[in-house]
Amino acid sequence: MSVEASAAAVARRYPDIVVARGEASLVVDRGVLLEALTWLRDEPDLQMDFLSSITATHWPDRDPAFWLDYELRSMARHERLRVKVAATEDDPSVPSVTSLFPTADWHERETFDFYGITFDGHPDLRRILLPADWDGFPLRKDQPLGGVPTWFRGATMPPIDERGMA
Amino acid sequence: MSTRRDLPGALYDPAGDIAEDLRDPATGEFRQETMIINMGPQHPSTHGVLRLLLELDGETVIRCKPVIGYLHTGIEKNVEYRTWVQGVTFVTRADYVAPFFNELAYCMAVERLLGVDVPERAQVIRVLVCELNRITSHLVALATGGLELGAVSVMLYGLRERELIMDIFEAITGLRMNHAYIRPGGVLMDLPEGSARKIRDLLDVLPRRIDEYETLLNDNPIWRERNVGVARLSAERCLELGVTGPPLRSAGVAADLRKDEPYSGYETYDFDIVTRAEGDAYARYRVRIDEMRESLRIAEQALHRLLEGPGPVMVEDPKVGWPVKLSVGPDGIGNDPAYLAHIMEDSMEALIHHFKMVTQGVDVPEGEVYTTVEAPRGELGMYVVSDGGHRPYRVKIRDPSFVNLQALPDVIEGYLVADIIPAIASIDPVMGGVDR
């Protein structure tokens, strides 16, 4: 089955799906995320049974400000599908998918670490790559690159935009 | 007598209160009959800076909590502040043992966003360097894993052969690692004169050397004792935990993106997916050895194609392709004198074009893509988003080391402390990729 045919099969149940550059992207509401992923995983024609990656993007000037990105892969059919879920600036939370895909554990912790998005039902949601006492969520677009106080006394590091580069 | 100084601020502990988790949930106390020890973050067998909090009952690991992030360098954030071409120099530093794969996955993403096709010869060069890189990566896994189990000869042999390939990388790209050789639209430059000869010599010598490792290790009683049945992971558990690469193939699943979702023309090469059934550390060792042979097969075919004749190695479209020409001089790879003369003396337009492409580069159409390659450690994915500008809006590196490392508590809880070492070595995480 081609990507287009799979997308058409998905569209009968979840209509908000587009195919661009050979990749299918499905947008669902966060309320039906678990239901949608379960269906995509168990539907015999789709078998999206492997979760490759979870991440997010931040669009501070738009509403919703956050888009979660779930990259699914069918091990048997060698096909991929992207599922996207929106989260707002005021309530950046989505249900955790660790119950469906145990691999989501570290992916969701990383997304929380970088973006401050909370995953309801995650067994151990805490920072994973940054220090536990880190202030802020560094991959949000309003966080500067550099410009944070350094650990060395008397030293400062201006944001990269103010260093006359790139 | 020295007096104790009061230090300002809190003690720096990247793990935060993670040790608190090891309290007994029933009593809230640390259990007296077990011991909590810290392994790492600078333990030599952790392949970088991985820290494990272990609760031990005698020699048995009751619980294991991996603590990562010591090598976090903010690659994904940094890339958002660079041009699309500069991004290559950042992503190549993630998994520094397999830099070409990072570059390839990233460039494939940019190319898909741009909608450009890469010239045939550049595709072949990409395949060639990636397969040689797969061999160096597996050699590092074998060499460091051997060293940690006391097989120092294996370390010496593995790094010796790796050095042969690193010399070839240096001849082709100018650098031993962090090459930034694969660029959006092709590769930086064609193979310099004489490198085909070097690769030919390498392909002649390596099969015998791989035989030597097998003679040394396959039936070695100590090697078998330390690896057979250790760190076993079933196919089902691998897939639940997102584990790919040699650990998944050693559990009997013939999953290889070069076959499943071919890229860079892999469907035109003749090679096999290596699998084993046992799913233990020994099976992963055997899978890596056999994969090196398959990589040699592919490299042979790629070299054969390269000898058929010259061709472009960068897209012809001047609005996309990298304008700079390099050549090999007496002091190594550097600017091509003819190209410098062209932009500095002949053509003002060429100079303007050069300046604009190098400082600002291309505007990439708005959109999002997720590209994957079969890296030595498994599925390496790049989720790249463009908002239409000349910088990436978001680059997410799905590094196989990061995901595979999640399986570590699974394979060592309930086993002996000594099994941790072959367990980590057989999963083969590279912390630069884990922490990015």
Image (cartoon, rainbow, N blue to C red):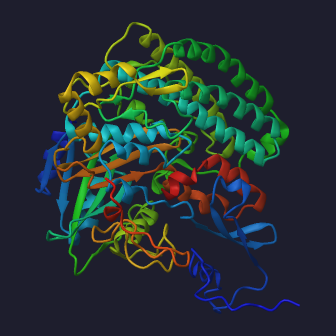
Rendered position, B277 above or below A164: above
Expressed as whole percent of the image width and height from the top left, the position of residue A99 reads: 40, 67
Mark count:
0
Nearest the viewer among B31 and B335 is B335
Q: Is residue A134 above or below residue B203?
A: below
B43 with respect to B138 (left or right): right
Residue A153 in the image: x percent, y percent? 55, 78
Residue at the image point whose x is 47% and y is 10% from the top: B304
Measured along the vertical axis of the image, is residue A130 above or below residue B103?
below
- On-image quarter of the N terminus of chain B: bottom right
In this rendered view, identify the residue nearer to me: A18 or B117. B117
Is residue A22 visible to the viewer in this orientation of the structure?
no
Q: Nearer the viewer, residue B406 or A8?
A: B406
Q: Residue furthest front?
A: B345
Q: Nearer the viewer, residue B195 or B130?
A: B195
Q: Residue at x 26, y 58 (%)?
A: A39
Q: Is residue A92 visible?
A: yes
Residue B314 occupies quadrant: top left
Q: Quadrant of residue B55?
A: bottom right
Residue situated furthest top in the rendering = B308
Residue drawn at point x = 59 percent, y = 16 percent:
B198
**In the orientation shown, which residue stands out farthest toward the right?**
B1
Tell me which residue sits at (51%, 30%) in the image.
Answer: B174
Q: Position of residue B127 (x, y in %)?
A: 44, 26
- Location of residue A36 in the rendering, given as x and y in whole percent from the top left corner: 24, 61
